[in-house]
Amino acid sequence: MTDKFIFRFVAAVSVFVFLVVLILNRHLIPAPATMPTFIVYLPKLNAILNGTCSILLLTSLYFIKQGNITVHKKINILTFCLSSLFLVSYILFHYLNPETRFGDLNGDGILSPEEKAAVGNIRYVYYVILTSHIILAAGVLPLILLSFYRGLQMQVEKHKKLVRWTFPIWLYVTVTGVIVYFMIAPYYPFR
């Protein structure tokens, strides 16, 4: 496979995933009238998957620093699979579940002045973390795919150059995914 083909493939997958997330998250395709019962478990599953990926990324870094390419590669394949599972779960949850607003204590979907006052300025911290998380999550996908490809092809120098960017961004996204979960979880209507 040529680099041109790989770049086109990565771009196509990245655009496709972005569009699917956008279409389903914005409910451009109506969700079913009845929410499936399993939906209440997805946010916690997503946090567990993100937290596990954070640990695996750090473990992968440890093993490559030790020169153990085999274990490094196996951990990265596992991390990639878990991140893919996370993505499916994330899309499914945000498609099926009505939007949860940070600070919405009564779960009516409206943030009243009293609710805003109750949560205070922590709302802004939440939104800064959430915004950076979303932007970097969207941007890191092509980097992950290219890094993964370069690593599997043993294109070590190209892999190293990509991973200098991919690793810290991917780690940030997985860690902030857990933080976002803990911050928004008290406001889920199904707590």
Image (tube, rainbow, N blue to C red):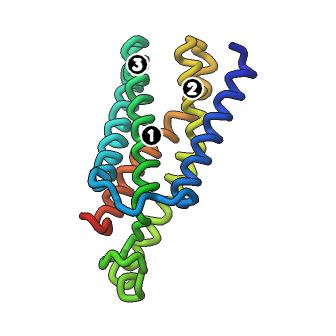
Q: What element carries label 1?
A: helix
Residue in the foreground of this view, choosing between 16 and 179? 16
Residue at 45% x, 35% y is 84
Q: Left of 175 or right of it: where is 149?
A: right
Q: Which residue is the site of mark 1?
A: 171
Q: How far apart are marks 1 and 2 (CA)?
A: 14 Å
Quadrant occupied by the C terminus: bottom left
Residue at 61% x, 25% y is 161
Relative image position of residue 184 (x, y in whole percent): 35, 63
Residue at 40% x, 53% y is 93
Residue at 41% x, 29% y is 81
Q: What element carries label 2?
A: helix
Relative image position of residue 121 (x, y in whole percent): 42, 76
Q: Distance between the residues labelled 3 and 2?
A: 13 Å
Q: Is disc 3 in contact with disc 2, using a CB cutoff of under 8 Å?
A: no
Quadrant occupied by the N terminus: top right
Q: Which residue lies furthest to the left in this view?
A: 191
Q: Quadrant of residue 118?
A: bottom left
Q: What element carries label 3?
A: helix
Q: Distance between the residues labelled 3 and 1?
A: 15 Å
Q: What amino acid is labelled 2 in the image?
A: Ser
Q: Left of 185 or right of it: where is 94?
A: right
Nearest to N terminus: mark 3 or mark 1: 3
Q: Which mark is residue 72?
A: 3
- Badge 3 local density, few (<14 within 10 Å), some, or many (20+)? many
Q: Which mark is residue 74?
A: none
Relative image position of residue 19 (x, y in whole percent): 61, 48
Q: Which residue is the site of mark 2?
A: 147
Q: Left of 64 or right of it: where is 26?
A: right
Q: Is disc 3 in contact with disc 1, using a CB cutoff of under 8 Å?
A: no
